[in-house]
Image: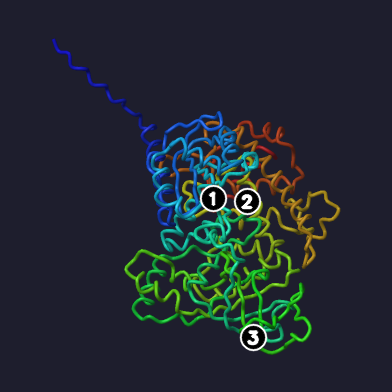
């Protein structure tokens, strides 16, 4: 008689389950690699181990630690379950020190106790530890849910891709921007938290160029000074096209770093040992800088809120000055010269040993623009974007997408800028939600540049003489203000954009509800599935122009009645630039 226990049969996974598990592994690896390059240590034995804290059972997927920063990490590739986590997250965030004590005293994770005993407790007190919850979702999380659970750092997928690109090029030097993303002030992390003194400053030798010598707008002060690469790296930030800062607050026009260019520059620095000659163009936070007539910083050069010199400091010629800049992260915005700056990054390549020395001794020439305190955020962004375009006009061709982003800043009332904003809102909510390509890494989504230029631009134009745009049917008594050359009525512009978005979403919703056999998703050439293409979207936008022109704009219910047989219409027969004919054919068949 054979008493050997029978082997448990291994569960055979479906293709769908295998792909899901691979996606989970890929997500974790992607984020763990980012953390490693920034300088975080990942603890072992965290994933899947349950604990009960303050009466609530939960678990963590990962814990990352860097000096006194502790990141409690959650991964998800499916529908975000952030609301289910709200209770435990609130309990942790209400008293992070108590949670850390709980982990230590109850020995929940052996690896945590080990790193705490050997590395942390000898250097930092529990109250000096900074705990953040990092929620990593592959799918978009609604702003409503984010507002409900607001004490969490949302590591959205486009932000993951941004830091993946950044850390792969400049490695450890990414930590300054990443800490800013986490909302951790520079004096709160690492050894800085041990220093109880007032925020330190550094002084650099330079010159002030008044408006009379620059021909810039009154109150715009230009200063040039030399700063060592290490000090600049710490203070610098770049408003890159795919960055993490909110789009409504910053301009997205600079490209990501070119890794080949950075490697070439590091090779030059290591081999030649010479500094780059060109100056670096920046903006400098006016609240983080002071200027003095003397090296001992006794006689301050005072500038009022309008950017004017005060008292005896009035000057119209280029004059020497000593520039005092706070020792803070992310206060010098680089408009031009990001590659020359980040070539000095803290890397792990063969050039690091020599560049490590150069980083502290080589001085870079920086030209900084200081805005008056009274200058509006819109005007600052316009100026920066315009200056960027001027500088780069004779260099590598600026792509159409970046040009559209720049127009949003320097000409926010132009048809292109308005069209771009409308397209962004169509991606936020409605039938095209999360289907429009906003970032270069996104695959299988609808391209945008042609929709803005050829579909939206003629549909939303400000022109009283034309009867085929939303402007012609917009019932707003102040709309004529948008025709003024230097219109600054942003509230009126916002109202018009919302009106256009509503009108477009209504017709698209009708199409979506009536198209059943042809899938409502971006077209995939490999499987020939999906109906959403640039041609289709532009075709619908041209249809809307015809409806406006012929006084046939109606509600969504009537659109549905008209389009109830649209599923029989061969949408895919129209290729590339045939969107105009497509709009006309749909109009003639279903609306005329």
Front residue of 35 and 481: 35
> Mark 2 falls on what kind of element?
helix
Left or right: 501 as drawn, with respect to 3: right
Name the spot of residue 241 as percent of width and height, x first. 55, 60
Name the spot of residue 434 as percent of width and height, x first. 56, 44
Q: Which mark is residue 203?
A: none
Front residue of 480 and 170: 170
Which circle's residue, 1 or 3, is located before the other in the chain? 1
Q: Which mark is residue 423?
A: 2
Left or right: 126 as drawn, with respect to 474: left
> Mark 3 falls on what kind of element?
loop
Left or right: 110 as drawn, with respect to 249: left
Q: Does 259 sit above or below residue 543?
A: below
Q: Which circle, 2 or 1, is nearer the viewer?
A: 1
Which circle's residue, 2 or 1, is located before the other in the chain? 1
In contact (CB < 8 Å): disc 3 and disc 2:
no
Q: Which circle, 3 or 2, is nearer the viewer?
A: 3
Which circle's residue, 3 or 2, is located before the other in the chain? 3
Q: Which residue is mark 3?
A: 294
> Mark 1 falls on what kind of element?
strand
């Amino acid at each position: 008689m054979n008493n050997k226990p029978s082997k448990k049969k291994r569960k055979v996974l479906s293709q769908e389950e295998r792909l899901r598990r691979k996606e989970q592994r890929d997500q974790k690896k992607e984020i763990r690699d980012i953390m490693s390059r920034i300088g975080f240590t990942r603890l072992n034995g965290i994933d899947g181990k349950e604990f009960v804290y303050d009466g609530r059972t939960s678990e963590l997927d990962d814990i990352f630690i860097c000096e006194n920063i502790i990141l409690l990490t959650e991964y998800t590739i499916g529908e975000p379950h952030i609301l289910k986590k709200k209770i435990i997250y609130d309990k942790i965030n209400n008293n992070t020190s108590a949670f850390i004590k709980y982990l230590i005293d109850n020995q929940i994770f052996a690896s945590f106790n080990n790193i705490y005993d050997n590395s942390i407790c000898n250097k930092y007190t529990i109250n000096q530890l900074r705990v953040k919850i990092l929620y990593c979702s592959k799918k978009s999380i609604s702003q409503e849910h984010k507002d409900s659970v607001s004490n969490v750092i949302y590591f959205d997928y486009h932000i993951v891709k941004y830091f993946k690109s950044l850390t792969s090029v400049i490695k450890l030097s990414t930590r300054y921007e990443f800490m800013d993303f986490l909302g951790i002030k520079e004096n709160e992390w690492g050894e800085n938290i041990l220093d109880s003194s007032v925020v330190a400053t550094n002084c650099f030798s330079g010159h002030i160029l008044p408006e009379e010598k620059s021909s810039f707008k009154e109150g715009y002060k230009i200063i040039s000074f030399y700063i060592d690469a290490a000090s600049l790296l710490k203070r610098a930030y770049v408003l890159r096209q795919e960055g993490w800062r909110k789009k409504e607050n910053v301009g997205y026009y600079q490209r990501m770093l070119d890794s080949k260019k950075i490697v070439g520059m590091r090779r030059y620095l290591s081999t030649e040992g010479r500094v780059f000659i060109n100056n670096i163009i920046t903006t400098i936070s006016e609240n983080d800088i002071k200027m003095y007539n003397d090296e001992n910083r006794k006689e301050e050069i005072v500038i009022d809120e309008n950017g004017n010199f005060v008292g005896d400091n009035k000057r119209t010629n280029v004059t020497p000055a000593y520039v005092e800049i706070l020792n803070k992260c992310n206060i010098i915005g680089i408009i031009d010269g990001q590659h020359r700056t980040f070539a000095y990054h803290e890397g792990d390549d063969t050039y690091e040993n020599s560049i490590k020395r150069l980083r502290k001794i080589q001085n870079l020439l920086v030209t900084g623009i200081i805005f008056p305190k009274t200058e509006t955020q819109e005007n600052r962004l316009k100026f920066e974007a315009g200056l960027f375009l001027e500088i780069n006009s004779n260099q590598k061709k600026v792509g159409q997408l970046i040009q559209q982003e720049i127009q949003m800043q320097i000409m926010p009332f132009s048809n292109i800028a308005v069209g771009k904003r409308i397209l962004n809102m169509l991606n936020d909510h409605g039938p095209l939600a999360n289907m429009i390509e906003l970032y270069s890494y996104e695959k299988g989504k609808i391209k945008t540049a042609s929709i803005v230029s050829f579909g939206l631009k003629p549909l939303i134009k400000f022109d009283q003489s034309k009867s085929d745009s939303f402007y012609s049917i917009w019932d707003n008594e102040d709309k004529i203000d948008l025709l003024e050359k230097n219109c600054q009525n942003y509230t009126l512009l916002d109202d018009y954009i919302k009106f256009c978005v509503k009108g477009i979403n209504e017709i698209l919703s009708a199409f979506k509800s009536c198209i059943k056999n042809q899938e409502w998703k971006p077209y995939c050439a490999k499987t020939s599935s999906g109906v959403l293409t640039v041609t289709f979207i532009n075709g619908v936008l041209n249809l809307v122009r015809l409806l406006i022109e012929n006084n046939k704009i109606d509600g969504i219910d009537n659109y549905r009645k008209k389009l109830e047989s649209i599923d029989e219409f061969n949408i895919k027969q129209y290729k590339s630039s045939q969107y105009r004919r497509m709009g006309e054919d749909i109009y003639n068949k279903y609306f005329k």
